[in-house]
């Protein structure tokens, strides 16, 4: 039995990290003795030919794709292409989007044989084991399938596995080197689930009631392994790292006890952090904590079930600053009850927090499947404009309130994006005059490297131009880099100086390498770590 797992396209602007969910699934399959591969079209270009080659060379009996809402259309297109290439291959999808639209998705897309709702490690292993027999699916928790008479939805597992019983994520199957080259973080989790009930989030329904925790020793074992991979940052991707202070402190103290020096970030609520917790997090290597403040208006906060106050936000931000941690505060515009006045309050509050030392940003409400705000949109005074899932990235309005229109929301976000571009322009000017700080200069340089490396990767420029014959004997790295830049330059839209600087940076940071076979020079990305 062989299983091919696919990560569909997801824009680099959303700062993706290596697909942790697929890594967990792959780890579970490997532990069960099932051969598995991962195709990641976030950091490699997709084409039907690439998919066909994988199907032919690996010959999987089951192909699975994951998706969030904005990547759903791409995931479906891949599943449809799989069936065109090899009709006998069984197909399955998972992820938050289809977990809450399972029957509708199965009804709309006959190319899809199965959907796994919620956590999928146990279900996917059982599906892979039973798929060759063509049946026996009625006892697989969370599985949606066709039985010849209609669509069947099995109940979810009411007793999901303990997290320490799950396998180690099979990151060796992911092209981690490409994420590292792009300057993207690697993610891990210490828990699953969230104890809160925000109406705009489906996380609680996805992970089940309550929160399950990994043991601090297991958490830090994984963290220690990740620190050796050379990523500049590790994201603790728990819905809420600080939900349980005992767990949070135990993880931090285990990091310190081992003498590790990782650089990491985490998500928290403003009412779950204290100065003691933040001090311990800082000592353990945390440099940024992300908070969802959502709105400055108390009535909106009450309506959406956030359960926090403006003063709590201010206290949490100040406590972070005092602890040497960067507070990053996000807001959602267009929530139920939003008016021009409440928008102004929230925007002004963001400015106030910035003056206190916080980073802040704005997104727009995206009523995702599975959220209460989508289910009860009319009750909340929300008008959902369309279901063009690719637009559900929270950077353009897909919903509006009675008092704030789509145009108003989009106008603000476009201005916000323009201000960010102007900020980058100011740094660029400051670098030219020597007025930019070292931190600002590095942030801009790193961003430019990321953009250039992504273009090189997705256009397969290294693969297409990185091989040539060298008849001059031994070659230095400087000459090899110069030769590569020379061969890329004529057909590239990348400025020559930027290309040379980025190639040199990628090589010096160990993400791009070359080898000499006889008299042939071959450049390649470092793929697997």
Image (cartoon, grey):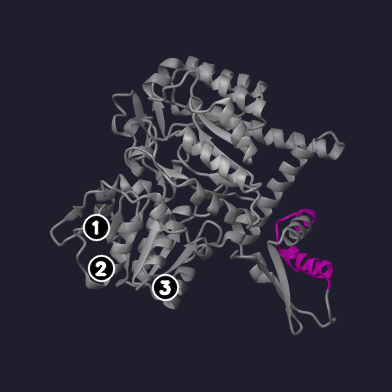
Q: Position of residue 479 (x, y in %)?
A: 83, 69
Q: Position of residue 41 (x, y in %)?
A: 50, 59
The residue identified by callout 2 is 130
Q: Earlier in the sequence, mark 3 or mark 1?
A: 3
The residue identified by callout 1 is 140
Compared with residue 401, is residue 18 higher up or lower down, i.e. above or below?
Answer: below
Q: For the view shown, which residue lies furthest in the front direction?
A: 257
Q: Are marks 3 and 1 in contact (CB under 8 Å)?
A: no
Magenta stretch? Answer: 476-499
Compared with residue 119, is residue 399 higher up or lower down, i.e. above or below?
Answer: above
Using residue 8 as the reference point, say whether residue 114 is left or right of it.
left
Q: Position of residue 191 (x, y in %)?
A: 44, 44
Q: Secondary structure at mark 1?
A: loop
From the image, state whether disc 3 or disc 2 is nearer to you. Answer: 2
Q: For marks 3 and 2, give the CA distance.
A: 20 Å
Task: Name the main secondary structure of what is drawn in magenta.
Answer: helix
Q: For the view shown, which residue lies furthest in the left direction?
A: 149
Callout 1: few (<14), some (14-19), or many (20+) C-alpha neighbours within 10 Å? many
Q: Secondary structure at mark 2?
A: helix
Q: Earlier in the sequence, mark 3 or mark 2?
A: 3
Q: For marks 2 and 1, give the CA distance.
A: 10 Å
Q: Secondary structure at mark 3?
A: helix
From the image, state whether disc 3 or disc 1 is nearer to you. Answer: 1
Q: Position of residue 18 (x, y in %)?
A: 53, 54
Q: Are marks 2 and 1 in contact (CB under 8 Å)?
A: yes
The residue identified by callout 3 is 55
Residue 495 belongs to magenta span = yes
């Amino acid at each position: 039995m062989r299983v091919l797992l696919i990560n569909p396209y997801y824009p680099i602007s959303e700062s993706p990290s290596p697909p942790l969910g697929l890594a967990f699934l792959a780890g579970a399959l490997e532990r069960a003795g099932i051969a598995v591969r991962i195709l990641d079209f976030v950091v490699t270009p997709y084409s039907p030919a690439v998919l066909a080659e994988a199907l032919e060379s690996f010959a999987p009996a089951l192909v699975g794709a994951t998706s969030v809402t904005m990547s759903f259309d791409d995931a479906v297109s891949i599943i449809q292409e799989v069936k065109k290439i090899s009709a006998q291959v069984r197909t399955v999808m998972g992820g938050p989007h289809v977990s809450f639209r399972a029957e509708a998705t199965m009804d709309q897309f006959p190319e899809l044989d199965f959907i796994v709702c919620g956590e999928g490690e146990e279900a996917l292993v059982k599906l892979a084991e039973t798929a060759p027999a063509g049946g026996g699916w009625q006892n697989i928790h969370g599985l949606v399938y066709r039985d010849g008479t209609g669509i069947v939805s099995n109940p979810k597992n009411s007793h999901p596995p303990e997290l320490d019983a799950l396998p180690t994520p099979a990151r060796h199957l992911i092209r981690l080197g490409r994420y590292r080259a792009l300057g993207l973080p690697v993610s891990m989790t210490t828990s699953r689930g969230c104890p809160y009930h925000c109406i705009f989030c489906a996380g609680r329904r996805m992970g089940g009631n309550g929160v399950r925790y990994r043991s601090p020793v297991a958490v830090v074992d994984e963290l220690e392994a990740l620190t050796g991979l050379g990523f500049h940052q590790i994201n603790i991707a728990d819905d809420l790292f600080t939900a349980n202070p005992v767990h949070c402190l135990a993880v931090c103290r285990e990091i310190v006890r081992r003498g590790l020096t990782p650089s990491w970030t985490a998500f928290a609520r403003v009412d779950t952090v204290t100065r003691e917790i933040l001090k311990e997090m800082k000592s353990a290597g945390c440099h940024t904590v992300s908070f969802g403040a959502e709105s400055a208006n108390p009535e909106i906060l009450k309506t959406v079930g956030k359960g926090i106050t403006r003063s709590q936000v201010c206290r949490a931000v100040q406590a972070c600053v005092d602890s040497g941690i960067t507070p990053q505060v996000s807001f959602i515009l267009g929530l139920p009850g939003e008016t021009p006045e409440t928008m102004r309050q929230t925007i002004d509050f963001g400015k106030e927090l910035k003056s206190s030392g916080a980073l802040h940003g704005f997104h727009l409400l995206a009523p995702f499947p599975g959220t209460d705000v989508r289910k009860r949109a009319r009750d909340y005074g929300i008008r959902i404009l369309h279901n063009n899932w690719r637009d559900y990235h929270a950077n353009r309005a897909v919903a509006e309130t009675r008092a704030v229109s789509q145009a108003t929301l989009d106008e603000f976000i476009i201005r916000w994006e323009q201000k960010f571009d102007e900020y980058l322009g100011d740094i660029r000017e400051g670098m030219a005059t020597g007025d930019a700080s070292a931190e600002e200069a590095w942030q801009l340089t790193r961003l430019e490297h990321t953009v250039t490396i992504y273009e090189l990767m997705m256009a397969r420029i290294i693969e297409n131009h990185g091989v040539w014959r060298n008849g001059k004997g031994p070659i230095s790295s400087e000459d090899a880099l110069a030769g590569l830049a020379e061969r890329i330059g004529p057909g590239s839209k990348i400025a020559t100086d930027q290309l040379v600087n980025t190639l040199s940076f990628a090589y010096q940071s160990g993400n791009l390498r070359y080898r000499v076979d006889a008299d042939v020079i071959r450049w390649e990305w470092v793929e697997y770590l």
